[in-house]
Amino acid sequence: PLAAVSIGNLDTASNVTYSVPGMNSSTQKMSDWTAATENIHQEVSVGGDDAATVSWIGYEAPVSPPDSWGVFGNEMAETGGKNLANALRGFAATRADDPQRNVVAHSYGTTTAAFAMSHPDVAIDNLVLVGSAGLPNHVTSADDLNAGAVYAGHARDVYPLIESGQGDQWAWLGRDLWNEHNVNPM
């Protein structure tokens, strides 16, 4: 099953953020993603902003290798991108007052969000890409994404079994080892 949980009132919020997870996400583990989304909600609500934050698991995310190799392809991200684009269109259709709209995506969720934001009839104010597994190759610049501003960040790449230390051991695999989503949003 797929699901979305809103923290805050989507009908009245002046600032709305969709939080899109990556690999190993599912509604079975949705309480973890919703807790992370609640952290985002607390930050965007600082200063009294009337905010709503959506824990969005509206696509089947790939599981980590070797159980599945789906994280290296675009099929799940394309399907998820269509679903996210539909969710954003639906939200926009219900709010004539045009609140600030944002998407925060993590890991393979960044690939999914990039597909959504590539639809010409979908637009948001801010797109935040964290720990990206890579954007689809048709995205050659931030201008290809229908967002007023695009932000990206990630920890340093750590190569398992080769080096130690803190950092991201997974995202670089998606960007560097397969051909479908090699664009580093940094």
Image (cartoon, helix red, strand yellow):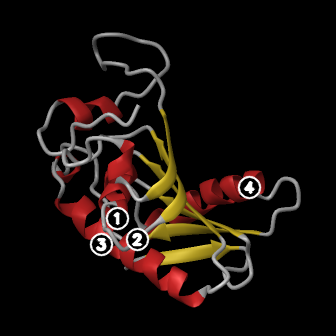
Q: Nearer the viewer, mark 2 or mark 1?
A: 2
Given the current orientation, which residue lies at the most extreme right position? 48
Q: Residues within 10 Å of mark 4 (few under 14, many from 20)?
A: some
Mark 4 in CB contact with mark 1 (< 8 angstroms): no
Instruction: Say which residue label 2 marks.
Output: 122
* Separation (CA) of disc 4 from disc 3: 26 Å
Q: Earlier in the sequence, mark 4 or mark 1?
A: 4
* Separation (CA) of disc 3 from disc 1: 6 Å
Q: Amino acid at mark 3?
A: Lys
Q: Earlier in the sequence, mark 3 or mark 1?
A: 3
Q: Residues within 10 Å of mark 1 (few under 14, many from 20)?
A: many
Q: Amino acid at mark 2?
A: Val
Q: Kindly identify the residue that appears in the image at 58 percent across and 75 percent down.
A: 5
Helix, strand or loop at mark 4: helix
Quarter location, residue 169: top left
Mark 3 in CB contact with mark 1 (< 8 angstroms): yes
Q: Earlier in the sequence, mark 4 or mark 3?
A: 4
Q: Residues within 10 Å of mark 3 (few under 14, many from 20)?
A: many
Quarter location, residue 42: bottom right
Given the current orientation, which residue lies at the most extreme left position? 179
Mark 4 in CB contact with mark 2 (< 8 angstroms): no
- Left or right of 8 on screen, residue 1: left
